[in-house]
Amino acid sequence: MLKLVSATFVRQILAGLLQLAFITFLARMIGAEGMGVYSLVILLPIILSQILTLGLQSSNILFIGTGKTSIAEVIFVNIFYIILVSIIFTLLGLFFLEYIMEYFFSSIDKLPVLISLLTLSPLLIIAIVPSIFQANQQFNTFNLITLIQPILGLISLLIIELGESSVNYAMIAYSLSSWLTAIIIVSILIKGNKITFSVKALQLYWSSKSYGLQSHLSNVITLFNYKIALIFLGFFSNALAVGIYTVATQMIEKLWLPSQAASSILFPKLTHAFNEDNNFDASQLTIFVAKIILVITSFFGIIFILLSHWIFVNLFGQDFSKSAFICLILLPGIIAWAPSRVIAHDIAARGYANINLHNSFVILFINLISNLIFIYLFGLLGAAIATSITYFMDLILRLYQFNKLVDFNAFTRLIPNYKDIFILIDFVKDFKRV
């Protein structure tokens, strides 16, 4: 397990470095204010693509993991759904762009919004289809897919930059890389698997929609928790503040790579284990993984903060020097969110998607209130304070809920001790062998 997480972590580090290169070139290409406009424009397809998945990823993992349907049938359901939803909501988006947008976003040009809207279909593919590989425990393929989009994004941006440096050209690079990534992912999927038309599979997904929707609502609310500070900054402040905050979060959220690696491995494995053995107890494994993730995230977080000012000034330019202080404020929350993600996947694998959903609603309320208060009072700094508080509260609530499901005190078990240093050494050894 630890070696598999290490291998996944390595590939996600590569993806993170590529994303870092992309953000660096983009920030230098369009500046802090342009970065703010770009961040606000791509919110539309990102949020839509996450909302419209309707929990298909969780359903894929559940049905493949429990053997209720074949991979060929799952592929059919996914492709059918993506095509249908893409057509409907792209048309609705075009209607919004033509007749409604000017009443709400008169300060933003229509062209970059149109370009972003046309990325909805590939973003749906990128969001949904990799879960099929994850559910089938094809982790090497799943990990390699995570590298495709940042590679193509960086190449597209470098090519586009040869022409002109503007938000419109940056959006073209974003759209181009998204479409190419989606085409490659579908090609890999079709090449290795068959597609079986199945009304039965459609009915199965529909009849079991409550599980997927509960997981989905939790994920959507989590997405809004990620983006609320950005939205409120755009409303209460200006594009410059949005640009500084975006670069700060893009950088410090790379500390979540270990938790993402652990969660992507842990969720399907637990789903399979619970299906094969009703008496299987995952609580010890989950809290062990969560604690190691806490230690690793804290370790890298301290190193990052010590170097952050130098990183932002030298990579992004003097305009982004404030991002280093924003990262310092965000760090406690970022560290807390890492083990919380692992625990959330354990709860979901047990079939208690409703617990995660309830937690997400509570956290959303805390996030909304804290952002309204702190951004109004302190602006950019307030966004970081509110976000850090929200992430820390998420861990507290998640541990409280997890305690109800297990027969030991998760709060005390999560506290690191001297023995964990040996686990960290093993992680580094596995990391070197990958």
Image (cartoon, rainbow, N blue to C red):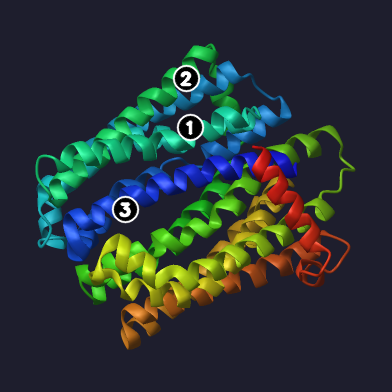
Q: Mark 2: which secondary structure?
A: helix
| Mark 1 vs 2, N-terminal side | 1
**Amino acid bearing label 3:** Ile
Q: Report which residue position mark 2 lands on.
A: 188
Identify the secondary structure beneath mark 3: helix
- Secondary structure type for disc 1: helix
Identity, as a three-letter code, of the amino acid under mark 1 = Ile
If the image is split into quadrants, where does the C terminus sit? Answer: top right
> Horizontal and vertical percent for residue 243?
26, 65
Which residue occupies the foreground of this view, 316 or 273?
Answer: 316
Q: Which residue is mark 1?
A: 145
Residue 97 x/y as whole percent? 15, 47
Q: Which residue does the image show at 52% across and 36% down from the upper left?
A: 56
The residue identified by callout 3 is 23
Q: Residue at x 60, y 27 (%)?
A: 204
Relative height, residue 236 to residue 106 (above, below):
below
Which quadrant is the N terminus positioned in?
top right
Calculate the distance from the C-alpha at mark 1 to the C-alpha at mark 2. 9 Å
Tell me how far mark 3 sits from mark 1, CA to CA.
Answer: 19 Å
Q: Amino acid at mark 2?
A: Ile
Circle 3 packing at 10 Å, graded few (<14), some (14-19), many (20+), is many
Q: Are marks 1 and 2 in contact (CB under 8 Å)?
A: yes
